[in-house]
């Protein structure tokens, strides 16, 4: 009991530390923003592009659900696509509480396991999905860096914080790969001192389930292509937000900047990327002539649009009666038809 209490207090401390860190960055950022310009930019907002942005967010969530579905099928899990869409729309709220999308992944796993499916099999599908997403993101970031070097030249060299961000991201990727081989070593018979820890055994069981995907390389290839397409959505979304505020940014400029920002906000150092996203956006967009007020508003509008699309579904999910959800038998019968 005491151990659980300490762990709970530790999680709360990390939560508030990340929140305080993000809010501190926001406070510093606001010092450099001209609020008169903010009001001018808001007055010229274009509702047409705002509507297109909301539609793109829903299309993105539908694409995420669509590409996750075949990964679930491989491990014998069949649920309606509409359920996966709803889980994906609500998941970002849970993702704000834990780093690196862990909260959203836990929420999705819990949502599917409610229908009687093995939660380890669900986690296995999420692990494979995240691995494909990581590969796609790393490839896109390297392409983005090359494009940024071509478009921005010496301006990019004057921004040293970028290399700290990329270096931290590289360390995290290296850590994930090392952990993968550590767990894999248990299968190969290596003697691991931590092998008796319950969490390691759980991860090892999830790893064993992921081995089923080796026989479905064609499906993985298709999902990987959809994943690469999904990685481009933040660029398109930022373009629509910029157009809604009449900010002059080209697709090439956004393709050079947005993936770097996406990588930065995935780092587990702030709550939901608050402060990190805004500060990095102001710094990078200034290299292509965007003012701090415009860069800040682009982030604010983007966050508000995501909130508006997610909040109604989250409220419905919280207050919907569990009995109103389809049972596992009904799901299987629907799939059979």
Image (cartoon, rainbow, N blue to C red):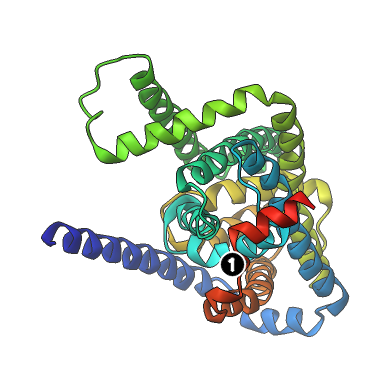
Residue at the (11%, 61%) spot, across then down: 2
Residue at the (39%, 30%) spot, across then down: 179
Local packing at callout 1 (Cα closer than 10 Å; few below 14, some 14-19, many 20+) is many
Would you place residue 68 above or below residue 247 in this image? Answer: above
Residue at the (60%, 63%) spot, across then down: 327
Residue 247 visible, this angle: no
Q: Position of residue 206 (x, y in %)?
A: 44, 36
In the rendered view, does 64 fall on the left or right side of 94?
A: right
Q: Looking at the image, which is closer to me, 218 or 41? A: 218
The extreme top residue here reads 189
Residue under circle 1? 90
Q: Position of residue 318 (x, y in %)?
A: 52, 77
In the rendered view, does 222 fall on the left or right side of 178?
A: right
Residue at the (18%, 64%) spot, across then down: 5
* Quarter the N terminus occupies: bottom left
Would you place residue 206 above or below residue 117 in this image? Answer: above
Q: Quadrant of residue 224?
A: top right
């Amino acid at each position: 009991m005491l151990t659980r209490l300490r762990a709970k207090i530790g999680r709360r401390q990390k939560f508030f530390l990340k929140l305080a860190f993000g809010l501190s960055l926001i406070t510093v950022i606001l010092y450099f923003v001209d609020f008169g310009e903010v009001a001018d930019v808001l007055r010229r907002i274009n509702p047409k592009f705002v509507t297109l942005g909301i539609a793109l967010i829903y299309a993105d969530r539908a694409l995420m659900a669509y590409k996750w579905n075949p990964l679930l099928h491989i491990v014998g899990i069949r649920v309606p696509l509409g359920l996966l869409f709803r889980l994906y729309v609500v998941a970002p709220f849970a993702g704000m509480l834990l780093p690196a999308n862990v909260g959203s992944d836990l929420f999705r796993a819990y949502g599917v396991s409610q229908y009687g499916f093995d939660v380890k099999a669900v986690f296995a599908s999420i692990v494979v999905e995240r691995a494909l997403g990581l590969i796609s993101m790393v490839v896109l970031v390297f392409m983005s860096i090359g494009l940024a070097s071509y478009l921005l030249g010496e301006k990019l060299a004057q921004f040293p914080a970028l290399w700290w961000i990329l270096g931290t991201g590289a360390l995290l990727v290296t850590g994930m790969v090392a952990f993968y081989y550590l767990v894999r070593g248990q299968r190969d018979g290596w003697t691991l001192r931590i092998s008796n820890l319950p969490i390691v055994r759980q991860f090892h069981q999830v790893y064993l389930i992921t081995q089923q995907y080796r026989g479905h390389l064609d499906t993985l290839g298709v999902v990987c292509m959809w994943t690469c397409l999904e990685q481009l959505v933040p660029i398109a979304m930022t373009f629509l937000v910029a157009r809604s505020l009449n900010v002059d940014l080209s697709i090439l400029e956004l393709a050079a900047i947005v993936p770097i920002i996406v990588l930065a906000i995935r780092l587990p150092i702030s709550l939901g990327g608050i402060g990190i996203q805004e500060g990095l956006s102001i710094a990078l967009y200034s290299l292509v002539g965007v003012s701090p007020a415009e860069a800040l508003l682009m982030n604010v509008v983007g966050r508000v649009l995501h909130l508006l699309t997610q909040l109604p579904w989250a409220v419905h999910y919280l207050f919907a009666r569990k009995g109103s959800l389809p049972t596992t038998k009904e799901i299987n019968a629907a799939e059979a038809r």
